[in-house]
Amino acid sequence: MYVIELQFECFDNTTVSAVDSAINGLMDALRYNGQVLGREFPIIMGEGEFRVRAVCPEQDSLHPDFHSDSVNAHFNRLSDAKLLAPKVRLLGRDLNSEESAEDSTPSWQVIYTTFVHTCSPLRSGDTLMPIPLYRNGPTLNGDHKAVVKWQTEWQACDEIQMTDGCEAKHSALKEIADIHSDLFRRGWDLRGRIEYITKVPTYYYLYRVGGESLEQEQQRSCPKCGSQQWRQDEPLHGLFHFKCDDCRIVSNLSWDFQ
């Protein structure tokens, strides 16, 4: 990932509220298209200019070729706030984030995230490196907002169940580990949409914890079709012990027995 800085210059008198609305609207649109990562984008106010720093998946993530209709619309609205189109400066590589997958078609891919990840939830099945969402064209309604919102909710549930500090952990765990949950249903539908667009087999990661014994866990079947042929001889990327090619699901051996 790379850290970039956007510099917005004023060409006429304006107001802080107008600038705030215009810049934050643009940053939200870029985020929902996968061109910038994270959720907070501090705006630094200077003399007749405003600066924003953000993390992008690639050096050229903000190239106009990747813009969604929403991003283009927010760029056009900058003039209403008396702002010029931003100058983009690449500050350098972010050592605390993951490198994006190469721009080539993987043999398979997977929707996978955790609460500590800020990168794209779409991962190459060959390397498990994140694939920038904007590479594949819009998922729904012209951008990738549905995928980003699904990721935000999945991460929130993951953090609640990991901290283990309140009764809400049971509901949160159900959302990420049960194929009958609303979060699974929406993620599963998005997975299918991505597979349809990219023509690449796309899998959904189903979180697994609990169970009665290691032996039972090793013998558990696919929760969607009941197949017992999904266990892998060796875990893929050291993480996915199970992979059902019919149902497009990957899962881990229960964390309680690892």
Image (spheres, grey):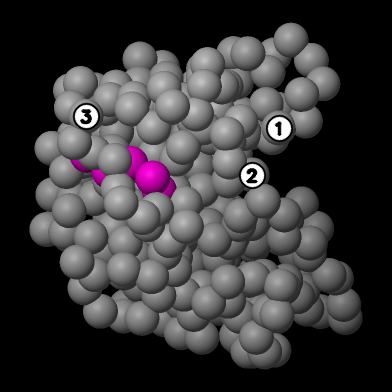
Q: Residue at x 31, y 68 (%)?
A: 126
Q: Is residue 128 above or below residue 7?
A: above
Name the side, left or right, on which 52 lies relative to 67: right
Q: Residue at x 24, y 50 (%)?
A: 202
Q: Is residue 170 above or below residue 85?
A: above
Image marks 2 and 1: residues in contact by CB distance under 8 Å: yes
Residue where numbered disc 1 is placed: 162
Name the side, left or right, on which 79 lies relative to 17: left
C-alpha span from label 2 to label 1: 9 Å
Percent x, y for residue 71? Answer: 43, 61
- Mark 3 or 1: in front is 3
Percent x, y for residue 20? Answer: 73, 56
Q: Residue at x 55, y 27 (%)?
A: 209
Residue where numbered disc 2 is placed: 115
Q: Is residue 234 above or below residue 161?
A: below
Residue 228 - label = 3
Q: Nearer the viewer, residue 43 or 132?
A: 132
What's the residue type where badge 3 is placed? Gln
Q: For mark 2, does the 10 Å Cα neighbourhood hold few (<14), some (14 to 19), or many (20 or more) residues?
A: some
What's the residue type where badge 1 is placed? Met
Query: From the image, which quarter does the N terminus lie in?
Result: bottom right
Magenta residues span 240-244
- Mark 3 or 2: in front is 3
C-alpha span from label 3 to label 2: 30 Å
- Compare marks 2 and 1 and give the one earlier in the sequence: 2
Query: From the image, which quarter does the C terminus lie in?
Result: top right
Element carrying mark 2: loop
Element carrying mark 1: helix
Name the side, left or right, on which 226 lies relative to 176: left
* Quadrant in the picture for residue 215: top left
* Quadrant in the picture for residue 157: top right
C-alpha span from label 3 to label 1: 28 Å
